[in-house]
Amino acid sequence: MATVIEKMRKLILFIFLIMTLPFMVMFIGCGHKSEAWDTMDTAEVLMDSMPDSALTVLSSIEKTSLGDDKEKARYALLMSMALDKNYIDTTSFDVLQPAIDYYLEKGTPEERLRTLYYQGCIFLNKSDFDMAMQCYLKAEDLKDECKDTITYANMLVAQGNIYAKSCQIEGYVRNNLCASELYNKIGEQRRELSSLIRALDGCISLGNIERSDSLMSRTDSLVQIHPELNEASIRVKMTYGIRFNSDSVINNILGSISDLTQYDDETKLDITLGYLNLNEPLKAKMIFESIAPDNPKTNSFRYISIKPEVLEAAGEYEKALDAYKKFHSTVESENSKIYSQKTTVAQELHEIKINHLYSIQRKNMQIWLGLCVLLILIIVICIIYYQLRLGKIKRIISEQEQSRLQLENENLQKQKSVLELERHNAQLECEKQNLATENMKLKISQLESDKHNAELEIEKKNLAAENMRLKISQLESEGEHLKELLTEAKLSKPVLDAIKERSDILNGLLAAKISDNDTYSKPYDIWINQITEDRKSFMNSTRLAFRASHPAFMKYLEDHGLTESELNYVCLYAIGLRGKEIGEYIQIKRHYHTSTDIRKKLGLKEDDTNLGLHIRNLMKKL
């Protein structure tokens, strides 16, 4: 029964996990933010005060490290803002596109406003004024929802510039006045002054002197705070003076102009209007024609509106008529575009609302569907639980019967265990006897091995005794030879001393070996200690002894160009040492180089016989 209940619990837990898994995934997905998110927070803080630093911070983010679509959209929007604030114009949507794809559907009003504003800026950079106006009209509908005042004011200014290009000066003035009020609320006086100057310029173009006077007083007070904008203010004041003042004042203004090249095209248009007011059409035409024909200003509203007046004053009536026609057709065309844009935007807004309603309906349907599925799962769980409860009594009876059978089986198992234990004890006894037999065999094998080792030890001792006899024989032979050398008077005293010392040592060593008395070998031990401490003295005495005992051998070596140190080295081979032992004795790292030099002088190659073996064979032959 416990097993069945456990299975039921696992089933209920599994169904619960399946139901909650989507919500867990949504929660984890929404809460995850990558390291780039914190970096973007830093860039957003720096955006207004230090836009160049914000651009540097954003440029340090690897695009591959960005997480979900929301994070990519935020990066795209912040990067577009940084580029705009650093006066870097772009005509590509590569940077902003993730923000367009995400924020226009899922963003807050502020995020949608910013996205539409920078989308419109890109269209303006591409000179696509129709699409830019559509973006700004959509953004304008968000004014009651968003709280991003500065972005909305910037949008109004950009939209006003499009109105100016489309000959809608009223809209140009209206947008800049609204923008100046918004800038004033947030303390952006410099931008407020720029907007007021643009609005004043528009009012002058419309001939509204009262409104112009009102704006002039406001601009004068702000110019004192921001004198860097005084140049733009002076140009607007010149336009105001030419448009509204008397002929004498206009004449004074125009008389102060000496070099036209220092004025921009907008100022030249103002000067042209001044000469038209003074009824000097030739000068007006000359100034007007000084504007380069390929200049973008030739397509501006002011240019095409002044051109008919200039031509008419100069008496070129046919050209003036054509200019008037072009002016009116341009105005009608731009008005038609604006109307079309507003209609398109209204239709798109209607479609957006319809899509939003459909989205809400789909979400409601999904919620109801989820509730129905949840209800069905609860019903299924209740049915399963009810069925399990009904089968509880049957399971109890079945378990009792199983318990009885299990007891009988346990008794049978106990009897089998007793028989198995007896069989196992018998098997252990048999294995114990086999183990005793194996131990006996091992002991016999060990005795045979000890016997064999003893025989090998005896053979080793016999061989050592034989070697000792040979060494004693060699020592006796060398001792006799040294005695004969001592009788020769031709040898020098150092040689005789070396020979005598070796002869005494050999005699003491032979006496020790023959009598098995260590007393005789003490001089030999002292000699050994001396030669290990004074290597150079030992090697020199050995060379002198060999020069006396084997003169032909030493002469052969000297004839082959061996130096004194190389002769000492060869004598160590001659007394029976090997190359490794010689290296350890003389303690010179380059002893291998000495061995190589000796082989070359004796005519031996690297792969020829061993040097020590060759030296000893050579000594025997000579």
Image (spheres, helix red, strand yellow):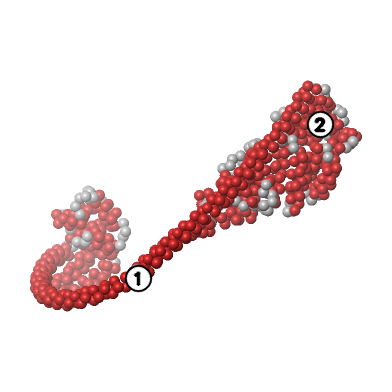
Percent x, y for residue 12? 41, 64
In the rendered view, would you say 130 is above or below 318?
below
Q: Which amino acid does label 2 sit on?
A: Thr
Instruction: Work out whether residue 55 can be spotted.
Output: no
**On the rendered image, what quadrant is the N terminus found in?**
bottom left
The residue nearer to you, when weighing 127 against 208, is 208
| Residue 529 sits in quarter | bottom left
The residue nearer to you, when weighing 235 against 152, is 152
Percent x, y for residue 318? 78, 21
Q: Name the residue under label 2.
A: 272
What residue do we see at 59% from left, 48% from top? 356
In this rendering, position of residue 2 left or right of residue 448: right
Identify the element where label 2 is drawn. helix
Percent x, y for residue 246? 90, 36
Mark 2 closeness class: few <14, some 14–19, many ≥20 residues within 10 Å = many
Identify the element where label 1 is drawn. helix
The residue nearer to you, when weighing 497 against 187, is 187
The residue nearer to you, when weighing 461 against 305, is 305
Disc assigned to residue 392: 1
**On the rendered image, what quadrant is the C terminus found in?**
bottom left
In this rendering, position of residue 622 left or right of residue 566: left
* Disc 2 to disc 1, C-alpha distance: 107 Å
Q: Which amino acid does label 1 sit on?
A: Lys
In the rendered view, would you say 492 is above or below 422?
above
Earlier-in-chain disc, 2 versus 1: 2
Percent x, y for residue 56? 60, 50
What residue do we see at 39% from left, 64% from top? 384
